[in-house]
Image: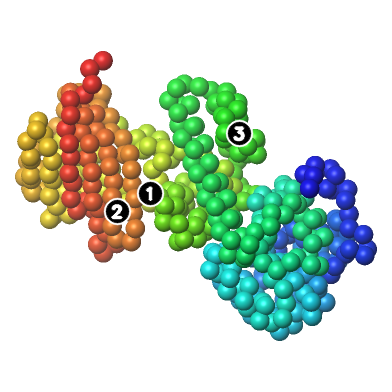
Amino acid sequence: MSRDSSALEDRRMSSADTPDIAVLGLGRMGTAIAARLVRQGCSVVGWTRSGREVQGITTVSDPGAAVGRASVVLLCLFDGDACSSVIDQVRGRLPDGAVVVNTSTVSPREAEALAKAVRDSGAGYVHAPVIGSLPAVAAGTLTILSGGAEPGAATPVLRALGETMVLSSPAEAAAAKLLANGALGDTLLALRAGRAFAGELGLPEERSWSVLERTPLGGMVRAKRERLEKGSFDDGDFTAAALAKDLALLAGTAPSAAELYEQVQGALDAGSVAADDDIAAFTVAPGTERPHGLSLAPSVSAPPDVLLPLQRYVAGHATGQADHHRLAFWPTAHIEGLRDGRLVSWTLDEYCKVFTGRPAEDEATRRRRLDHVRWHGTVATATMTLSHGAGVFTDSFVLLRLDGEWRIANKVFHRADAPRE
């Protein structure tokens, strides 16, 4: 199928092809899809839970009324729970021969359960999540990941929206969508790292985007360049919260995606990215300089309360004042490691006696970098590199949350000589 947008825009359905369509869910994507189909000459009735009216689209207050005459029912909903709720409301009112086309992003297991619920009502079910956001909807250049029954009456509808990739089942279509969004998340974090590299190399930002546009990341740079250059991420085409939701589904099925999800969700939890921001906001590295020579690696993103004890720990080193360490560690903590080839093991009290109450003479040249943070429930792990004069320390931490407060439970470390210049 040709993906030339002008050709697709001009290819309207004939009256013989035009089914009656219900679009259930008029958020950003649902509204864009309904508007595209109206422009293609389709008869569209919409419904949204909020009851809001959408210019140019006929809306009704009840989803059952929306599907009463529809041969094609498009679901454009936020998650599996919303899909299940709406299907429960409409499946007794679907006309004979109707096809439900679900564009929502859900887990493979949820897709199969939704398919069964619709089929048990006598209607057809096509799971059809899409690759592409609002500009692709408007141009009719979505990639539609179609799994389930033959589209039947929905075929011209899918053709009006883009190119269809046929998959073996609803579960496979759902899995393919999660794969695509996982790759999308990784691409955003790769761009975030690229921005950090460019800054460290002293490249002007405009020049760095031109370079990155000529790499395998180029598609994302081209799609988001205006937002990236302006730093304007509000009114997102694909929102940060929606991507985080999808990555949670991915991590629930593919455990290797857990770290990706934690980084994305961590940026939301930390407030560095807002829920309604465009996903391009994830390319802004949170690793800006912190007090006491602390920086965060581009891949590090964690809630402020997880970072707080690590920042207190750094403050203790920078000032030489043990009180910072007493706030950073739980009183039962132990500090152990190899120093000059010998095992060192301290209680917190013994460790605090090492500090003199004054900064080191070379403090102005010392640097600390938080390389890694992961957290789940009440436990977290972190790794930090400390460049302290002639020594480079690698510190690894286990953190524990008690009564809502995070502190360091234990620390191990390794000291090596700093490389000579």
Q: Which residue is mark 3?
A: 218
Q: Are marks 3 and 1 in contact (CB under 8 Å)?
A: no
User: At 49% across and 32% down in the image, what residue appears?
Assistant: 194
Q: Amino acid at mark 3?
A: Gly
Residue 286 in the figure: left or right of residue 362:
right
Q: Which residue is mark 2?
A: 380
The numbered mark, 3 or 2, whose residue comes first in the sequence reads 3
Q: Is residue 48 visible?
A: no
Which quadrant of the view contains residue 421? top left
Q: Residues within 10 Å of mark 1 (few under 14, many from 20)?
A: many
Give the x, y percent position of residue 208: 55, 26
User: At 28% across and 50% down in the image, what residue appears?
Assistant: 381
Compared to residue 172, the image places residue 315 above or below, namely: above
Give the x, y percent position of residue 321: 15, 39
Q: Amino acid at mark 1?
A: Ala
Q: Nearer the viewer, mark 3 or mark 1?
A: 3
Say the numbered circle drawn on residue 302.
1
Residue in the foreground of this view, choosing between 272 and 356: 272
Q: Secondary structure at mark 3?
A: helix
Q: Amino acid at mark 2?
A: Ala
